[in-house]
Amino acid sequence: MAVERKFIEDAIERYKIATFLETELDKAGFSKLDIQRTPMVTRITVEVTKPGKVIGKKGKGINDVTKILQEEFGIENPQISIAEVKSPSLEPRLMAKKVCKLIEMGKNIRRILHSLLKEIMDAGALGAEIVASGKLVAKGGRSKSLRVSAGYMPKAGEPTRLVKEHLQVASPKSGSIGVLVRIVWPGTEFPDKKIMKPVELPRVIQAAEKVERQE
């Protein structure tokens, strides 16, 4: 039982750290993190789109985050490494947040999903799916779902573990809308798919225009 309790406590602590960093580094384009414990240090690697915002002037930003991890989370000697996201269009969290911000700006939801699905596939994804569920129409309308997808996307079994996904919630005036983004990264090998055929996008996706987002 002691070993099981230790695993549970470690999982809870990792979740708390991830939640804190996700909130703290949101404006820096937080994507994901990796935590590795050793007897001497706790190595935390964070991937963001804007590393400079995390590091801060003369390292003040990253020093402040390190201090909070020590004092509030009780982590001894945390070593934080900041890495820049190489392909933002292939990161489900970043794309889900992008969809949510465009929805909150009042952009056409169907156009948003088509545009960003095209962006993901143009970045080299083997498959992608975006699902928006909730108050997709004016306030007072019934909830419904809108789904767009392209390429190969496993739905059951062990292959689903190879799919990267993230769920984000948009809050426009009409009501909350859940946005689920699922992406199959380039180079992913599935046991039931030895040879992946080139992905051909549907015409409606090929013709989708880019939806601009105001910063």
Image (cartoon, helix red, strand yellow):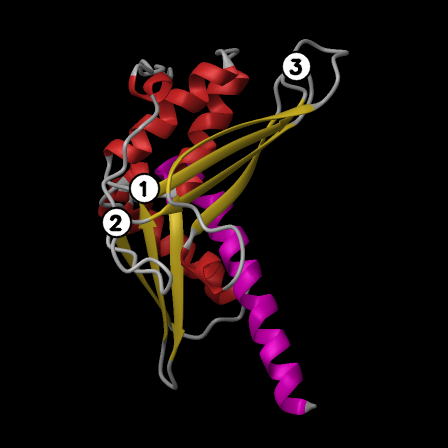
Q: Position of residue 201 (x, y in %)?
A: 31, 28
Above or below for 65 versus 30: below
Q: Is residue 215 visible?
A: no
x 23%, y 40%: residue: 198
Image location of residue 211, percent across then percent down: 36, 15
Residue picked out by circle 2: 186
Residue marked by disc 1: 90
Q: Quadrant of residue 112?
A: top left
Question: Which amino acid lies under the numbered mark 3 shown in the image of this protein?
Answer: Lys
Residue sitting at x 51%, y 26%: 100
Label 3's element? loop
Residue 50 in which image quadrant: top left
Q: Is residue 188 magenta?
A: no
Q: Secondary structure at mark 1?
A: helix
Name the one closer to the observer, 93 or 49. 93
Tell which tag, 1 or 2, sits nearer the viewer: 2
Task: Answer whether residue 12 is magenta in the image.
Answer: yes
- Of the two numbered discs 3 and 1 in the rendering, the one whose residue sits closer to the viewer: 1
The residue under label 2 is which amino acid type? Pro
Q: Tell me the residue at 66%/90% (across/down).
A: 2
Q: Which residues are magenta?
A: 2-30
Question: Do the numbered discs 1 and 2 sit on residues whose CB atoms are within 8 Å?
Answer: yes
Q: Is residue 59 visible?
A: yes
Which mark sits nearer the N-terminus, 1 or 2? Answer: 1
Which residue does the numbered mark 3 point to in the structure image?
173
